[in-house]
Amino acid sequence: MPRTATGLAVTAPAATATTVAARPPATVEEVVGRLREIAVALPMADGVAVFNRLYLTVTEAVRDRLSDGYFADPSAMAELDAVFAGRYLLAVAADAAGQEPPACWRPLFALRAHPGVHPLQFALAGMNAHIQHDLPLAVVELCRRRGCAPAEVEPDYHRINGVLADVETAVREQLLPGPELPERAEPLTHLLGTWSVEAAREGAWSAVQALWELRGLPAAARAFAAMLDGTVGLLGHALLLPLVPYDSCEGYEDYDIDGVHDDRPDRTGSPGTAAAARLPEARNRTADGTDAGGLNRPDPG
């Protein structure tokens, strides 16, 4: 069971997860509704909740631009928004059901309750997973659905950057620590200098082009998607490195550093357990979608 930053057990949004698993969102308004349900179900300090609030703000901003002439093809962008959100919602559903989300999402879900991780890190880790992994797959799926090439949606894809820039600036200002926490401000400033939405979306577009070129080679496309999933997950680990020493995190003094442990967060809800502080194992997948260690796992792509 997921826990808050205080180590108390919280209830996963099971009803929301059931809805998500039953059918993907069809409209932007439905996406907004689902994100609001998740926001209500999770405690404010939960790392997934931090990202979810950011994602809700972005989705509402994009929705508001769909009817004001900002996009050349608003219907395509509305459909992309729903397809894109569906991947995050499925990760939420998998976690709520006690299953592993895709590798790109595992760091955020595993460390969602770690007291040494700052809320801004949760926001960045969520954006990293969703933009650099989920977005390329969503764009390719959109193009297949509509029978168009990525180049036809590229101008509107880049127009979204302007919307994201405004939201990102506001969120960073809200989440950065105040002057009373100088020991956290410096490492966060450094972290912000190493990751940006614009660079992530440019990288995502390169992945779109690669996946599109591989569309006639299913095995190669699956291998590329699996590589992308794992690579983005590794960056997620780096973004979530705690900014305070583990021995100063009350309730996590038994942090496991030998690397031999289950990579799922503890769901027993027992206060004082160390599972939420564990770094999940990074697993390498082979081209057929299996773990290098021989464990079969579903291909997230």
Image (cartoon, rainbow, N blue to C red):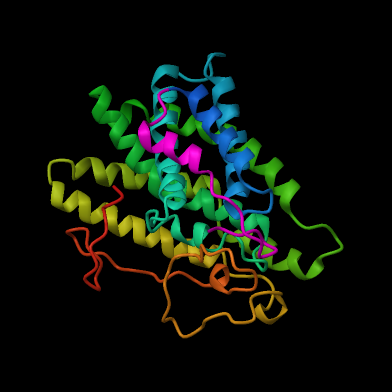
Q: Which residue sits furthest bottom?
A: 258
Is 215 drawn above or below residue 245 in the view shown? above
Q: Quadrant of residue 272?
A: bottom right
Q: Quadrant of residue 250?
A: bottom right
- Residue plotted at (53% across, 55% down): 125
Q: Quadrant of residue 152?
A: top left
Q: Position of residue 26 (x, y in %)?
A: 40, 24
Instruction: Judge from the rendering whether residue 97 lies leftward or rightward of residue 166; answer left or right.
Output: left
Q: Position of residue 55 (x, y in %)?
A: 57, 39
- Residue plotted at (36% across, 31% down): 23
Number of marks in picture: 0
Q: Nearer the viewer, residue 50 or 171?
A: 50
Is 146 one of the magenta-colored residues? no
Instruction: Judge from the rendering whether residue 58 lies leftward or rightward of residue 281; answer left or right.
Output: right
**Span of residues in magenta:** 1-26
Instruction: Judge from the rendering whether residue 170 lies leftward or rightward of residue 62; answer left or right.
Output: right
Secondary structure mainly formed by the magenta segment: loop
- Residue plotted at (35% across, 56% down): 229
Q: Nearer the viewer, residue 93 or 168?
A: 93
Q: Position of residue 112 (x, y in %)?
A: 58, 59
Is 8 one of the magenta-colored residues? yes
Q: Position of residue 140 (x, y in %)?
A: 29, 36
- Residue plotted at (67% across, 69% down): 116
